[in-house]
Image (cartoon, helix red, strand yellow):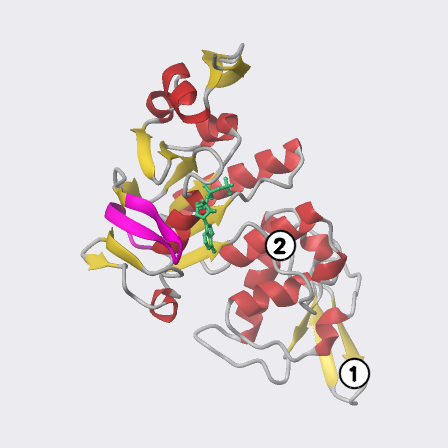
Amino acid sequence: MSGQSLTVSNLSAGYARGEVLKSLSLPPCLSGTVTAIIGPNAAGKTTLLRAIAGLLPARGEARLGERNLVGLRPADLAGVVTYMPQALPHGVALTAIEAVVTALRVVPSERGLRACLKMRQGEAKTVISRTGAQRTFRFVSTGSAEIAVCSPPSRIYKQALSEAEIEAKAAAALDRLDVGHLALRQLDELSGGQRQLVSLAQAIVRRPAILLLDEPTSALDPRHQIDVMSAIHEIAAEDGMIVLVVLHDLNLALRWAASVALLVDGGILAAGAPQQAITPQTLERAYRIRARVEPCSQGRLQVIYDGKAG
Ligand SMILES: Nc1ncnc2c1ncn2[C@@H]1O[C@H](COP(=O)(O)OP(=O)(O)OP(=O)(O)O)[C@@H](O)[C@H]1O
């Protein structure tokens, strides 16, 4: 992975009705770490991620090493930046594993992926499809009892990876987030939290240099919030990825982020180590609340909300 940092400086971006980000600069976001982007509603957090992802016209710099990403088309950024939006679109007729495979930019044509074959790891089963073609399914996942993938699918467009590698990566991404058992379910049949986890699997499977996650925990229960933040933290460290994650839960930011940027009205109010950016003073200025930031019984800093500021 890159081993570089992302440096955002003097970044301006917005919409036809006006500029949202106003010459915003961030401390360098280091490879292998998670940077939390926090701030009140409408502060410009999504706009910041979309500007870095090349999804909005922008001015200024978002520099990965020597290369300024601003002005590049999304297609040019595809191998570098992955952006996970707040919600997966509805009405997409794909299973979860098809969605993740699609994120690797291949076209799965093998309907057999829909077949739910229950096998123990290492077993393989040969079936005859409706077209009469013979397919061998095998179990590739370590964490799920229900993932079976087809080998060899007939018309998957090969890229750098073999068919088997693509399928194994997609299955592993779902398993990593504990949703391997949903591999063969239609996206439209999933709950909001399940869809969010599949969407995150789509994002992490590409292993980009820069991963931009927009509120990846907003629909998740506490257990899954911990799972997801822990997975993001580990993946960033293992792959040397630069991860920017928009969060409203300040305790998740305190626990998992190496650095925090607090946005207000399109600019940075505070940025740096979590304990420097999240303080009673910055929270009062940003959110107009009274809050304490205190160590819990295990020594971790936590935000305690006392009420609205006068
Ligand atoms: N597509 C759009 N067209 C016009 N204005 C937009 C568009 N998307 C967002 N905005 C405006 O840009 C501003 C910043 O929005 P943005 O979505 O970046 O905020 P945010 O910090 O992510 O908010 P939230 O926490 O509510 O998701 C808001 O005033 C919003 O109304």
Secondary structure beneath dot 1 equals loop
Q: In the rendered view, does 215 fall on the left or right side of 262?
A: right
In front here: 180 or 142?
180
Could you tell me how many numbered marks the image carries?
A: 2
Position in image of residue 11 (x %, y %):
26, 49
Question: In this figure, which residue is indicated by the disc labeled 2?
Answer: 198
Residue 129: mark in rendering: 1
Q: Does residue 15 belong to the magenta stretch?
A: yes
Q: Does residue 276 belong to the magenta stretch?
A: no
- Which residue appears farthest toward the left when viewing the image? 66
Bounds of the magenta segment = 1-22
- Mark yes or no: residue 108 visible: yes
Give the quadrant of residue 220: top right
- Which residue appears farthest toward the front when viewing the image? 17
Residue 4: mark in rendering: none
Mark toward the start of the polypeptide (2 vs 1):
1
**Residue count near mark 2 (Cα–Cα under 10 Å), binned few <14, some 14–19, many ≥20:** many
Q: In the rendered view, does 13 fall on the left or right side of 86?
A: left
Q: In the rendered view, does 222 fall on the left or right side of 2?
A: right
Position in image of residue 83 (x %, y %):
45, 55
In front here: 113 or 149?
113
Give the main secondary structure, helix, strand or loop, of the magenta stretch: strand
**Residue count near mark 1 (Cα–Cα under 10 Å), binned few <14, some 14–19, many ≥20:** few
Position in image of residue 78 (x %, y %):
39, 66
Position in image of residue 258 (x %, y %):
37, 32
Secondary structure beneath dot 2 equals helix
